Image: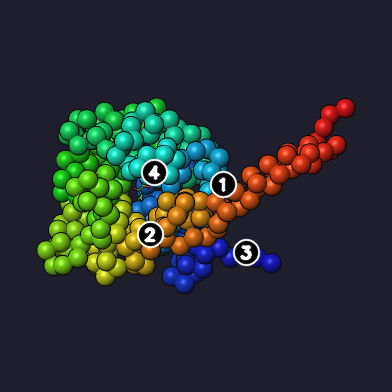
């Protein structure tokens, strides 16, 4: 039976045929690493694509082999991997170490390294210094930073220096202390206009894509229509060009309540806990190791 990937179906319905399918970000047949030019071409083809976060080599290799074309070493590692209460404490050392691991664990995906809080807010020169570190020491193919108009100068300098930038507007979690939580952004005419200005500002500054986080679906659709760079939605409805989820939310690894926009595709926390309990019971009861696990 011939396998038809979702990307082939998409390109088929768009009338672009097998050539477009071979270039598809998800389901494509190319074996080299995906670049920001491939991302731009996908927007031109009208192809939707998935992005997941990753924080270690082994998990990243699973996603790479599943065909996930873009992985974000997000500063969500603060909450999901390092045990912090928010993304705010994440450091450049932590980001560089884990980004390098994700790069080592992958062959095809474009790896985007997040610039953590305090690594670019001082201005463009600080941003360039830290982005350069992620590119050189970790080997990422692009960096992400938060903020619209307020981060435009940083984006401009990075892009001039040859560093691809993914921007991030709407709910920007590094500003949790200013927001007083994680509220939906862009509600009401004035806030919606500001969001549109922010998205336009990062595009004009040279960003190759922009994350829209926690934005009403209709507004995200309007931003997506009005930009020539792709929008990557998280809690921003179905009309963005791409969708990103934090992998521990997507796979049911996160403890407790997950945000409403999350769809869980597995229950890894339950499975892993069950495996750990089964191992513990075998050890305590003497069933493990058995003869086949022992050397003679
Ligand atoms: O750090 C992160 O994981 C992110 C995504 C939620 C977009 O910024």
Mark 4–mark 1 CB contact (< 8 Å): no
Residue located beneath label 2 in the image: 259
Question: Is 52 on the left or on the right of 227, as rendered?
Answer: right
Question: Is 203 on the left or on the right of 260, as rendered?
Answer: left
The image shows residue 146 at horizontal and vertical percentages of 25, 45
Residue located beneath label 3 in the image: 3
Mark 1–mark 2 CB contact (< 8 Å): no
Residue farthest to the left? 190
How far separated are the C-alphas under marks 2 and 3?
34 Å
Give 233 or 256, whichever is nearer the viewer.
256
How far separated are the C-alphas under marks 3 and 1?
20 Å
Residue farthest to the front? 285
Mark toward the start of the polypeptide (3 vs 1): 3
Mark toward the start of the polypeptide (1 vs 2): 1
In front: label 4 or label 1: 4
Q: Secondary structure at mark 3?
A: loop
Residue at 73% from the left image edge and 39% from the top image edge: 284
Residue at 39% from the left image edge and 27% from the top image edge: 137
Residue located beneath label 4 in the image: 79
Quarter of the image for residue 133 reads top left
Residue located beneath label 1 in the image: 62
Mark 4–mark 2 CB contact (< 8 Å): no
Q: Residue 179, labelled with which disc?
A: none
The image shows residue 58 at horizontal and vertical percentages of 56, 40
How far separated are the C-alphas under marks 4 and 2?
14 Å
How far separated are the C-alphas under marks 4 and 3?
38 Å
Any part of residue 252 in sight: yes
Residue at 35% from the left image edge and 53% from the top image edge: 40
């Amino acid at each position: 039976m011939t396998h038809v990937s979702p990307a082939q179906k998409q390109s088929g319905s768009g009338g672009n045929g097998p050539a477009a399918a071979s270039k598809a970000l998800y389901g494509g047949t190319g074996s080299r690493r995906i670049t920001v030019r491939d991302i731009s071409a996908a927007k031109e083809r009208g192809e939707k694509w998935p992005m997941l976060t990753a924080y270690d080599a082994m998990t990243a290799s699973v996603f790479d082999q599943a065909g996930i074309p873009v992985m974000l070493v997000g500063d969500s590692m603060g909450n999901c991997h390092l045990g912090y209460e928010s993304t705010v404490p994440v450091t450049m050392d932590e980001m560089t170490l884990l980004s390098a691991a994700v790069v080592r664990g992958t062959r095809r995906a474009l790896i985007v390294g997040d610039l953590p809080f305090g690594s670019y807010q001082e201005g463009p020169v600080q941003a360039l210094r830290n982005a350069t570190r992620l590119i050189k020491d970790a080997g990422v193919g692009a960096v992400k930073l938060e903020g619209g108009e307020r981060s435009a100068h940083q984006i401009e300098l990075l892009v001039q220096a040859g560093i691809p930038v993914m921007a991030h507007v709407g709910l920007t979690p590094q500003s949790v202390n200013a927001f007083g939580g994680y509220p939906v952004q862009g509600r009401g005419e004035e806030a919606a206009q500001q969001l549109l200005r922010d998205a336009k500002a990062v595009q004009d500054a040279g960003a190759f894509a922009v994350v829209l986080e926690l934005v009403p679906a209709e507004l995200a659709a309007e931003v997506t229509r009005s930009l020539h760079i792709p929008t990557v939605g998280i809690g921003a409805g179905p009309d963005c060009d791409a969708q990103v989820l934090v992998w521990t939310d997507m796979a049911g690894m996160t403890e407790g309540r997950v945000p409403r926009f999350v769809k869980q595709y597995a229950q890894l926390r339950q499975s892993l806990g069950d495996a750990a309990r089964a191992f513990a019971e075998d050890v305590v009861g003497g069933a493990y190791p058995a003869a086949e696990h022992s050397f003679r």
